[in-house]
Image (cartoon, grey):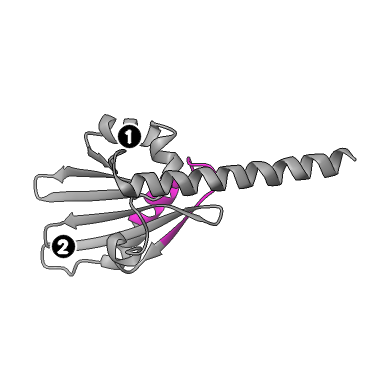
Amino acid sequence: MIVVLSFSRFQSDRLAGCADAEFELPKTDGGAFDAAKFEEAFADLVKAGASKKKASSIVRIKKRCETQFADRTVFASCAKETILSPTATMRSKNFIYLFEAVFRKDEEMKNCIKDGGDWWSLPRDSSEFAGAKFHNDVDTLRRLGEQATRDLESAQ
């Protein structure tokens, strides 16, 4: 039996990431598989992991990440397969949508590699990277300008 669960992660008002987890599970002996109970238990694990990330909120989504957020640029991904038991496997793929999380910091990459995952990121020589970097730099300058204005107003 295959069960797919997908969760998006938001930091403040921005989509930070999304994870698809595909479970290949054995059929239970004589009983029906309780998908709702399994989903609830897995959601609790995901939320516990997200609470370690600053100001994150988790939203369960009904579609896979690539379908739900098809209009967004994926800056990096981490794919991993985990053997849960001799008869159960989990294949997961985490998508990262924040430019700064991939190209200004290496924590996501480090965690992926440390956990035995396969890391991919948008090539730095691509036109997608150049456009995203430009927009990220403009957004950073805008936020700094807004903060400087607030600081000046509060100093008066």
Tag in front: 1 or 2 = 1
State how far apart marks 1 and 2 are (Cα): 28 Å
Q: Which residues are magenta?
A: 42-59
Q: Which residue is labeled 1 in the image?
A: 109
> The C terminus is located in which quarter?
top right
Residue at image point 30% right, 68% down: 63
> The N terminus is located in which quarter?
bottom left
User: Where residue 123 sits: x, y (%)?
Assistant: 27, 40
Residue 55 belongs to magenta span: yes
Residue 16 belongs to magenta span: no
Front-most of 2 and 68? 68
User: Where residue 103 sits: x, y (%)?
Assistant: 40, 36
Q: Which residue is labeled 2 in the image?
A: 2
Amino acid type at mark 2:
Ile
* Local crowd size for mark 1, using a 10 Å CA cut-off: few (<14), some (14–19), many (≥20): many
Residue at image point 37% right, 65% down: 61
Q: Quadrant of residue 125?
A: top left
Examine the rendered structure and indicate whether residue 97 appears above or below residue 36.
above
Q: Earlier in the sequence, mark 1 or mark 2?
A: 2
